[in-house]
Image (cartoon, rainbow, N blue to C red):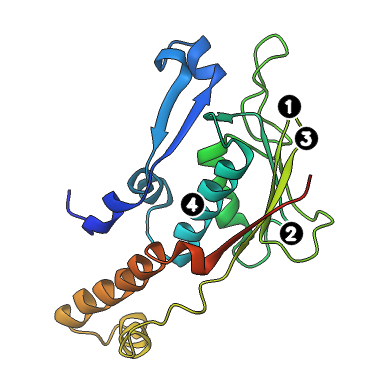
Amino acid sequence: MTYPKFYETIETIKVQDELSSFLGAFENGIYEISYLEIVKSAGHSCPTVLGAYLMTSEALKALYPNTNAKRGEIEVSFKERQSEAVAGAIGNVIMNITGACTNNGFKGIAGNFDRNYLLKFEQDIKEASARFTRVDTKKSVDVFYNASSIQFDPSMQGLMQKCVKGEASYEEKIEFGKVWQQRVEDISKNISSVITVKELN
């Protein structure tokens, strides 16, 4: 399996999942989720997928400063409809990390471990890209993601057009992939420039 090596430089997200512990998947339910694993589940790497990953990582650091984030016990809200722009795609990435689902997730065992209705759209949020809330303490953070300050290679747009139109050579297709992932890598190296976390309570 060949992939850009910068995927491995992005900080992993460590979680504790009580369902995982209950069913014996991981000792004490503790495990780490990497950007590479998210890329596999999404099928690609792009500024949106990376942005969702970074938003979740930074939000969980703020919500759980001294302990592991509790997967399955985090509510995530968006102001957009699920079908609007990339809200659904972002939600899918965040779902894979936090366990939060709309109404299509694990329904629980004897009233425990239910992950449904923790991922919400069309919520009363004014500006934030997403809002993360701990179910236990009700502490919330708004997360803002904006990668517009990270410039892309000048050749990228022309190469993309050629690829989409089926006019690109093999070499141009390879080059497009490289410059595309270069921007993703540049974003990953400038987290403080693209992510802002605001504590609400």
C-alpha distance separating marks 4 and 2: 20 Å
Q: Amino acid at mark 3?
A: Lys
Q: Amino acid at mark 2?
A: Arg
Verify CB contact (< 8 Å) between mark 4 and mark 1. no
Disc 3 target residue = 138
Name the residue at 63% across, 68% down.
Answer: 85
Verify CB contact (< 8 Å) between mark 3 and mark 4. no
Mark 1 neighbour class, 10 Å CA radius: few under 14, some 14 to 19, many 20 or more: few
Q: Amino acid at mark 1?
A: Asp
Q: Secondary structure at mark 1?
A: loop
C-alpha distance separating marks 4 and 1: 23 Å
Picture coordinates of residue 16, whole percent (x, y) = 51, 25
Verify CB contact (< 8 Å) between mark 3 and mark 1. yes
Q: Secondary structure at mark 3?
A: loop
Q: Nearer the viewer, mark 2 or mark 1?
A: 1
Dot 2 or dot 3, earlier in sequence:
2
Disc 2 target residue = 81
Q: Is residue 93 visible?
A: no
Residue 31, quarter of the rendered image: top left
Dot 2 or dot 1, earlier in sequence:
2
Residue 24, quarter of the rendered image: top left
Q: Is residue 103 visible?
A: yes
Name the residue at 30% across, 86% down.
Answer: 159
The circle drawn on residue 136 is 1
Q: Is residue 97 left or right of residue 185?
A: right
Disc 4 target residue = 53
Vertical order, 157 against 41 (above or below): below
